[in-house]
Structure formats: C-alpha cells, structure tokens
Amino acid sequence: MARRGTNTKAVWAAGALAVTVLALTGYAMLNGGDDNSQAGKGDEESPSAGGSTGPKPSYTVPGDWTEPERWAALPKGARTDRYGSEVGFPHTEQGAEAMLAAANNTAAEDSTSLVDEQLRIFHSYITKDARTEQNAEKVELAAGQTDKELHRKFSLKPGSDLPSGAYVRNTVIGFKVIAKADDEVSAWLLARVTEKAGETAKESVTYTRTVVGIDWENGDWKLSGTVTSRAMQEIQGQAKPQMVAPGDAAFNQAGWTAIREAS
C-alpha cells in the first residue's frame, strides 16, 4: 500500500508545474506559503501560486467506495505537438476541461526531469504574449532549483537521471469549474502526486489543488494568467473544495467532478 507523503516544497512544485509556469511569466497571482494542515480541513489552508495549496500529509482514502456523482468523459487532443504535448482540443467546455487536465498531467522519470516538463508546459500551453525568451529563462532557472530539491530529497546527485523505478507523477483526478464563457474557462483542479525514489522504495501519495484559467487563442486553449487572476478574485472569501480522492463521500460533498477519459 502506498504511504501518504509529507508536505515538501519539491513535491508541491512537481504537482503544480502549470501554475508555477504561469507565476514565473508574471501573469498569475502569487500568495506564498506552504500548506501544513490535514486533508478534510478544506477551508483552513493558505493559498500558494495560482491559488494552489500543498500536498496533504495524512489523508487516507476510505475503504468504502462511494461512487462519484459527477463524471466527465474528456475528449482527446487532435494531435501531439513538437514538444510531446497533447494539443488541439475542441472549442467546447469539455475541450477546455480536457486541456486543463492535459496541461497539468506531468511525469518526471528516467531521463525526463522537472526542467524538461516545465519547459514543455511553457512552450505548449502558455499564451503567445507570455512565451518570451526572458520568461523561458525564468522558467528554466526556477525549474532547475526545484529539480535540485527533488534530487536532494531522493539523495541523488543534482542533474543526474532518476534511477530505475524512481518517478514523480502528477495526475489530475477531478475538477470544479469556477467560471465559463465561450472563450475562457477557469477551474479548481484536484491532482494526485505520486513519488518513488527507486524500485525498492515505497510510493508516496499526496494531493494538491490549484486554480487555473485558460482562454481560446489561435484555434486552441492556452493557459492564461489573466483568466487565472480573474478566477482568483472570484473565489475570494469562498470555501475551498476539500482535497479528497474519488470514492470518498467528501469528494461529492466538495462538488468535484471525476475524470473519465474518452476512448
């Protein structure tokens, strides 16, 4: 059984690469601070980049399964771009939700580092006005520091490939729409972050939630700091949805929609 991970900056950053990229391009609202409270205490956490909160250190998925009341079968992107990212999502609410999930699903393993993943998100998903050379340098430098922290956590030499069986994976498992229009959508995203230091190491599982906004630009959905900032303003003073897994009764109470990928 996977153990529940501790709240570390490296793990949080690995689970929130998209909002970190938005923040580094200067378009997202930033409120620093790590989240040290337990899962299920949904309204007490302090926000971080892009309205996110850190991994939950002691949450355990209940043994009794409660079927999610809301499921979404999200469409695939029409193609894969030169960076290996799924793009070309439909100009619909479901297409927007699918892009939000795709842009926040990441994996650092083998020779793929957090730097690689963060730059991939930057080049594939950020709005054109923010994709400047200066911002690319900011993203690469910040990602390099996060990657060093991860290697230190795994007791590895900085810059080295992760050993066989080691990984950090962020998978979006639910969402809750904040606002929607024809050309922009914002939502809370619920993600599961799994990490393992090697083949014989125990897998650690934590959960994060982030606020992300996107808009329709040149025939595709793109991560937008402007839309994200508007979403942050809209949720001010509202209770934050609890970070709980699908199958937990509290998942339904929090208003999450579980993700089921379309075939």
Image: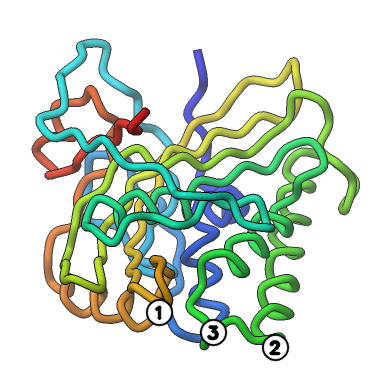
Give percent across and percent down for residue 198: 76, 25
Identify the image's colour scheme: rainbow, by chain, secondary structure or one colour.
rainbow
| Residue type indicated by callout 3 | Ala
Does residue 215 appear left or right of residue 247 in this picture?
A: right
Q: Dot 3, crowdedness within 10 Å: few (<14), some or many (≥20)?
A: many
Residue at 68% over, 34% down: 167
Mark whose residue sits in front, 3 or 1: 3
Give percent across and percent down for residue 67: 15, 20
Q: Is mark 2 on a helix, strand or loop?
A: helix
Task: Report the disc number at residue 225.
Answer: 1
Q: Going from the N terminus, do you reach mark 3 or mark 1 first?
A: 3
Above or below: residue 12 compared with residue 57: below
Mark 1 to mark 2: distance in Å?
16 Å
| Residue type indicated by callout 1 | Gly
Residue at numbered disc 3: 130
Residue toward you, 37 or 5 = 5
| Residue type indicated by callout 2 | Gln
Mark 2 to mark 3: distance in Å?
9 Å
Q: Going from the N terminus, do you reach mark 1 or mark 2 first?
A: 2
Task: Report the disc number at residue 134.
Answer: 2
Which of the 4 image quarters holds residue 143?
Answer: bottom right
Residue at 64% over, 86% down: 132
Does residue 177 appear left or right of residue 262 in this picture?
A: left
